[in-house]
Image: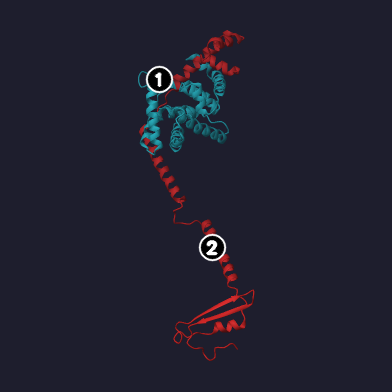
Chain colours: A cyan, B red
């Protein structure tokens, strides 16, 4: 996470960028996209487990952000604001997918094929083929376990554990109370602990 | 009053302190089991952080480029939509044409009724009709004026003539 100083600096310039976007300029929005595209994409990828879908959903989220940037009042950080859009788009997509696919949205065969030489999961140096394969298997197990959570529980656990967001930030991004966030975290952790115990015990 | 789930989550994330912490820990039936579960949760957290962080976005520049194009496209479509809905548009929609036609017809009918009512001929005596039918020759009497005064309630009509040179021989009521 950012330090307070860098956070304050980026907040000031971020607000300036947003104001210019609200005046109709597109270049400042490009700058905002550059700042957040990797984090947004990474978060969506962890939610949907598909690079192509994550790409499309990230595009859709930023496009929605552009269309509604006039309504951004600066009461929260831009990051929290755009996260709310990202979560709405992604959770909505997951719900629709679950309805279409009858709830079975995870496919082992699809997951195991994703051994990409350029992927982060394969370190550029040192890693031996069997180590790389082992890491891919672990990742596949984790993704499968996360895939068994409801979209809301998925969002909460990823925002807390991966993005290290505070309870109130998560609540703001999801449009719910802090109590709801904590309650969802409780159940999401319990479920993941039961599904992944053997993984984190053996690693 | 926080629910147990909320307190447990706060406790796992080391967000409880002071009296709240001691009260919560005192309420746990098996503190050793709770501590073991807390350790489990930490391991899970470490595993998730290690394995799921920062999945790379490949072709970052293409991502931005594609988004820019979509924004331009959307902005163009919005502008076209605004222009289409604009009141300065020269193309009238079919409902508008229908409304305009109906309104014009109604105005025409109202005007027609009013004009027909106003032009209904008043009851005139045969005498007055004969006088009005007479002609004053502008060559013979260029300054001649003829005025008619009619008082309907008294059933009286006055014909006032001025500047006549001579009255034609046949100018008389029959």
Q: Please give the label number shown on residue A66.
A: none
Q: Quadrant of the N terminus of chain A?
A: top left
Q: Are marks 1 and 2 in contact (CB under 8 Å)?
A: no
Q: Is residue B165 above or below residue A188?
A: below
Distance from Cα at disc 1 to Cα at disc 2: 70 Å
Which mark, residue A4?
1
Which of the two residues, A10 or A52, is positioned nearer the viewer here? A10
In which chain is the residue bearing label 2? B
Q: Nearer the viewer, mark 1 or mark 2?
A: 2
Name the mark on residue B104: 2
Q: Is residue A27 visible?
A: yes
- Assign a secondary structure to mark 2: helix
Say which chain tag 1 marks.
A
Q: Percent from the top left, x then y, of residue B50?
A: 44, 19
Residue furthest out toward the bottom: B169
Classify 10 Å Cα crowding around label 2: few (below 14), some (14-19), many (20 and above): few
Q: Residue at x 60, y 70 (%)?
A: B117
């Amino acid at each position: 996470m950012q330090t307070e100083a860098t956070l304050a600096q980026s907040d000031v310039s971020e607000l300036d960028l947003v104001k210019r976007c609200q005046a109709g300029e597109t270049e400042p929005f490009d700058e905002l996209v550059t700042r957040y595209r990797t984090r947004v994409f990474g978060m969506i990828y962890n939610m949907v487990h598909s690079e192509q879908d994550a790409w499309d959903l990230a595009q859709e989220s930023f496009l929605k952000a552009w269309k509604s940037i006039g309504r951004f009042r600066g009461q929260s950080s831009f990051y929290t604001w755009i996260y709310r859009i990202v979560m709405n788009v992604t959770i909505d997509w997951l719900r629709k997918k679950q309805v279409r696919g009858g709830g079975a949205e995870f496919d082992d065969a699809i997951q195991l094929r994703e051994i990409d030489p350029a992927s982060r999961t394969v370190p550029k140096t040192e890693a031996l083929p069997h180590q790389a394969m082992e890491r891919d298997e672990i990742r596949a197990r984790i993704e499968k376990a996360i895939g068994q959570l409801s979209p809301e529980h998925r969002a909460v656990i990823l925002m807390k554990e991966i993005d290290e967001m505070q309870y109130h930030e998560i609540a703001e991004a999801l449009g719910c109370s802090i109590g709801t966030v904590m309650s969802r975290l409780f159940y999401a952790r319990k479920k993941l602990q039961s599904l992944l115990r053997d993984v984190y015990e053996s690693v | 009053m926080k629910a147990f789930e909320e307190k447990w989550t706060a406790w796992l994330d080391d967000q409880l302190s002071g009296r709240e912490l001691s009260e919560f820990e005192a309420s746990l039936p098996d503190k050793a089991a709770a501590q073991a579960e807390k350790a489990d949760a930490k391991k899970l957290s470490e595993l998730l952080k290690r394995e799921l962080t920062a999945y790379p976005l490949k072709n970052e520049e293409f991502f931005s480029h594609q988004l820019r194009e979509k924004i331009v496209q959307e902005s163009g479509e919005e502008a076209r939509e605004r222009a289409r809905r604009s009141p300065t548009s020269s193309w009238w929609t079919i409902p508008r044409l229908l409304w305009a036609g109906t309104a014009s017809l109604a105005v025409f009918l109202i005007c027609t009724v009013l004009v027909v009512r106003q032009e209904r001929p008043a009851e005139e005596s045969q005498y007055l009709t004969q006088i009005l039918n007479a002609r004053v020759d502008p060559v013979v009497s260029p300054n001649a004026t003829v005025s008619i005064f009619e008082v309907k309630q008294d059933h009286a009509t006055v014909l006032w003539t001025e500047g006549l040179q001579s009255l034609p021989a046949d100018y008389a009521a029959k």
